[in-house]
């Protein structure tokens, strides 16, 4: 019997259960929407930060680039001024008291400032390198042998380089013409003309990446540090020849090389005579010259204060004797930066 005055308990209807399930499902959908929105917002925020960072880096790199360009033009002006004043390669000890050299042609980085921002300047005399388009086979074999190559390998590269330069398709003994290069996995023709860029050496039979670039145990000094496509004279300017060129050409050990460099710094006359006696072949007597540098590589690296990205440019310039400015033979844009300068 039911208690008096109490209504009977009714079971929960199926409709009410279904309504409760719909509310839970809707709540679950809302939660998933919020999760997706949060994920999309986080990704968008991250992309915005990356874009902002990339924009800041681009702005900094652009400012550093134009700073480097300004420093390059200032260096051109200083070199012209030094030429006109006959002080282009005067040793510092011969300058007047308190006078600083306008340019230093020693192949080393020198820190300077422009508008209060740091710039690094390096000047190399191209006439202090061996002209790759004029060098003869016997000197080529000697240089390659001094770099550590076996005689057969040195002879192969020397003959192949001459075949690459000459206008005909006839191969020298141990040389290579188009028939050899067309048989390679990636075929190409021999140029049969003078090199326009030193990197062409990498296309010549027998020249490896390590031999060209150097910096390895087998080849500490690379071909790119010894030869030049811009030196159009069959000579080497001893006054500004780099240590790498002197070491390889005359097959000097480190002690002998340092003695030559020290003697050159104190006075060139005796060094010129010494190097003449050290030439590997008596027929090369006309190879060495002693001249004021006039064909320069001006290498500039700059970084605006606050910019995380430095910039580097370079140019090959011919000072010549013109009063109209320098002749820019080649301009190198956006070069890889030297990280050691910022260490």
Image (tube, rainbow, N blue to C red):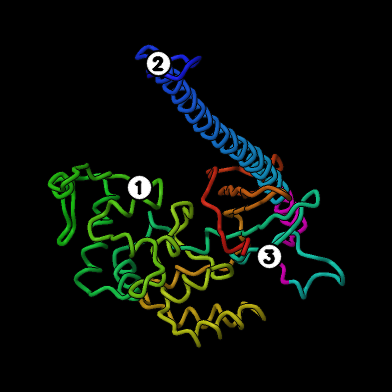
Q: Who comes first in sequence, dot 1 or dot 2?
A: 2
In the rendered view, does 25 fall on the left or right side of 119? left
Q: Who comes first in sequence, dot 1 or dot 3?
A: 3
Residue 10 — which label? 2
Residue density around tag 3, few if under 14, some if 14–19, many if 20 or more, within 10 Å = many
Residue at image mark 3? 89
Q: Contact (CB < 8 A) between labels 3 and 2?
A: no
Res. 206 visible in picture: yes
Residue 194 — which label? 1
* Mark 2 element type: loop
Give the alpha-carbon distance from disc 3 to disc 2, as whole Å: 111 Å
Given this view, does label 3 or label 2 mark the residue nearer the observer?
A: 2
Residue 100 — which label? none
Q: The magenta stretch spans which residues?
A: 77-91
Give the alpha-carbon distance from disc 1 to disc 2, as whole Å: 105 Å
* Mark 3 element type: loop
Q: Contact (CB < 8 A) between labels 1 and 3?
A: no
Q: Residue at x 52, y 64 (%)?
A: 128
Q: Who comes first in sequence, dot 3 or dot 2?
A: 2
Q: Quadrant of the N terminus?
A: top left
Residue 310 within the segment the image draws in magenta: no
Vertical comparison of 217 with 132: above or below: below
Vertical comparison of 79 with 100: above or below: above
Res. 295 visible in picture: no
Residue 90 within the segment the image draws in magenta: yes
* Mark 1 element type: loop
Q: Residue at x 61, y 48 (%)?
A: 309
Q: Residue at x 23, y 45 (%)?
A: 190
Residue density around tag 2, few if under 14, some if 14–19, many if 20 or more, within 10 Å = few
237 and 3: which one is in front? 3
In the rendered view, does 192 fall on the left or right side of 232? left
Q: Farthest top residue? A: 15
């Amino acid at each position: 019997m039911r208690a008096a005055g109490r209504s009977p308990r009714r079971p929960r209807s199926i409709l009410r259960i279904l309504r409760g399930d719909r509310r839970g499902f809707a709540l679950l959908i809302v939660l998933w929407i919020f999760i997706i929105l949060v994920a999309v917002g986080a990704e968008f925020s991250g992309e915005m930060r990356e874009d902002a960072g990339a924009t800041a880096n681009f702005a900094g790199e652009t400012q550093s680039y134009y700073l480097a360009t300004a420093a390059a033009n200032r260096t051109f002006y200083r070199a012209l001024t030094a030429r006109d004043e006959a002080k282009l390669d005067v040793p510092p000890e011969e300058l007047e008291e308190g006078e600083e050299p306008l340019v230093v042609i020693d192949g080393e980085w020198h820190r300077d400032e422009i508008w209060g921002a740091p710039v690094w300047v390096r000047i190399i005399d191209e006439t202090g390198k061996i002209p790759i388009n004029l060098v003869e086979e016997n000197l080529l074999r000697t240089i390659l042998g001094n770099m550590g190559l076996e005689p057969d390998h040195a002879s192969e590269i020397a003959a192949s380089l001459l075949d690459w330069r000459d206008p005909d398709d006839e191969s020298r003994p141990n040389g290579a013409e188009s028939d050899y290069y067309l048989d390679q996995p990636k075929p190409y023709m021999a140029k049969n003309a003078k090199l326009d860029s030193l990197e062409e050496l990498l296309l010549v039979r027998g020249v490896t990446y390590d031999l060209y670039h150097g910096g390895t145990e087998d080849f500490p000094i690379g071909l790119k540090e010894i030869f030049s496509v811009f030196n159009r004279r069959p000579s080497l300017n001893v006054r500004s020849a780099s240590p790498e060129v002197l070491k390889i050409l005359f097959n000097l050990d480190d002690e002998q090389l340092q003695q030559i460099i020290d003697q050159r710094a104190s006075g060139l006359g005796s060094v010129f005579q010494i190097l003449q006696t050290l030439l590997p072949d008596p027929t090369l007597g006309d190879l060495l010259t002693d001249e004021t540098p006039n064909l320069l590589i001006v290498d500039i690296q700059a970084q605006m204060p606050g910019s995380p990205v430095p910039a580097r440019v370079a140019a090959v310039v011919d000072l010549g004797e013109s009063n109209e400015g320098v002749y820019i033979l080649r301009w190198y844009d956006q070069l890889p930066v030297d990280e050691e300068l910022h260490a």
